[in-house]
Image (cartoon, coloured by chain):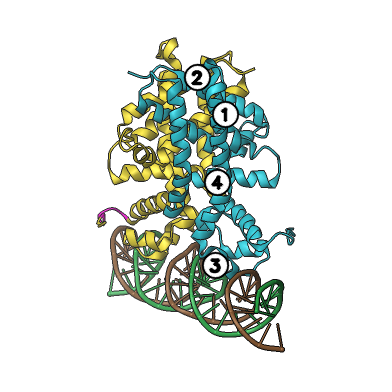
Chain colours: A cyan, B yellow, C green, D brown
Amino acid sequence: MDRPADLDRQTRILDAAESAFAECGFAGASLRRIVAEAGVNLATVYYYFRSKEGLMGAVLQRRFGSLRQEQLARLKTCGRRAPRRARVERILEAMIAPPLRLAAARSADAERIRRLIGRIVTEPNPQTQALLRRHHDEVRVAFVEAVRECLPALPLPVLLWRLEFVWGALAFVLCNPRNLEEATQGVCDPEDVNKVMAQMIVFFASGLRAPGPG
Amino acid sequence: MDRPADLDRQTRILDAAESAFAECGFAGASLRRIVAEAGVNLATVYYYFRSKEGLMGAVLQRRFGSLRQEQLARLKTCGRRAPRRARVERILEAMIAPPLRLAAARSADAERIRRLIGRIVTEPNPQTQALLRRHHDEVRVAFVEAVRECLPALPLPVLLWRLEFVWGALAFVLCNPRNLEEATQGVCDPEDVNKVMAQMIVFFASGLRAPGPG
DNA sequence: GTTCAAAACGAACGTTCGTTTATTATGGAC
DNA sequence: GTCCATAATAAACGAACGTTCGTTTTGAAC
């Protein structure tokens, strides 16, 4: 089933761990299943990653590190050159496109990554939460600042709440892409990334632009 | 720490289990910790609930059952009498208010329920997912129908996606109420339920009313 | 006072968990 | 060929896991 024996052992462990964590969560995943899938001895995990939590950290670093970079890079390019009217849409696209595109293909790899992202957001393990926050905070702050420039009239707490809603919806969709497909019996296709992205951008841009309550 | 010895054992087990599942997820929670907190023998869990999964099922039944009923009841009352212009807002309130109010108080009980809801949404355990879906589907369909009546011009897939975003954001906020508070150093207070609810309703109503993409 | 089913228990089942230790291969430097 | 750090392994550790078994307590019925 799994013969990536040409890859080095660290990578094979990371791949298998990502898969297991995405499917079972931190507590539910077992190192023995991971090393079996990776074709590696159990102790190798400890040689390279020191512990199960160290392994999770490495998995998150590899995947969320590049994700974060891509989000921030996109945000930078869209900051100045976009026309004022579509600025919010561009910012949202910078948020949404990287994780959604990462999952564009109908490959097992993509499915795995999507699940991992969604799963991690509600991961009970405190160390995992702390790791995620370290990755996410930088991104969150950047996007708050960007949207704030576009919508200066919006009070800060309102803006913070609204962006939180965006992150939540994004994570939810990533985590359970099958939910909607099954529930609607094919009316909505989570695999059509461009369509989903367009849906989200329209929806969230409208929400962000709504006048503040009160 | 825990002296609800006057309650019957089933209830004590359910309370302790709810707490453990909310904090650690299904795999992360241990029956031994649960029975210790409940002041009950380990085998009692099996006597009443047949298995760990049976226990989880009972926990979900107790909590989501009443939640679902309240959501549907609220939806019914708001269906006809509300003025046309504010119909969407009333529907959103029927969705959001029950789970959010359940968590209104700053009690440990409320915190526990919030966590449970958020946690369950991304729970890896297949049986738990199936249980959740059974509870959630009825509610989802009802709300889809209700919003559809309000916004007949909106294509069905667009509406389905948008309601999915609402559920996602709601679950996210419920699961990690501390996230925003910590990240913003007190600018946003997740405990102020009425304010949060108002925020969500404005945001989502605006998103739902946005013209369809295309 | 006996009977009997429901309720609750103590103790152990076998398994799996994350982790550690001690040992063996590997491969370039001298 | 020797040396030595790196890489990888086999085997086992103690602890915790979900689950089951056989027994005891309880409380109402007769």
Quadrant of the drawing holding the N terminus of chain A: bottom right
Q: Secondary structure at mark 2?
A: helix
**Residue carrying label 3:** A46
Judging depth in this view, the residue of C26 and A46 nearest the camera is: C26
**Residue carrying label 4:** A65
Q: Secondary structure at mark 4?
A: helix
The image position of residue A204, as x and y in percent, is 51, 24
Q: CA distance from mark 4 to mark 1?
A: 19 Å
Q: Secondary structure at mark 3?
A: helix
In the image, residue B7 lies in the stretch drawn in magenta? yes
Mark before the other along the chain sequence, 4 or 3: 3
How many callouts does the rendering have? 4
Numbered badge on residue A77? 1
Mark before the other along the chain sequence, 4 or 2: 4
Disc 4 residue type (three-letter): Gly
Q: Is residue D7 left or right of residue D12?
A: right
Disc 2 residue type (three-letter): Ser
Res A105 quadrant in image: top right
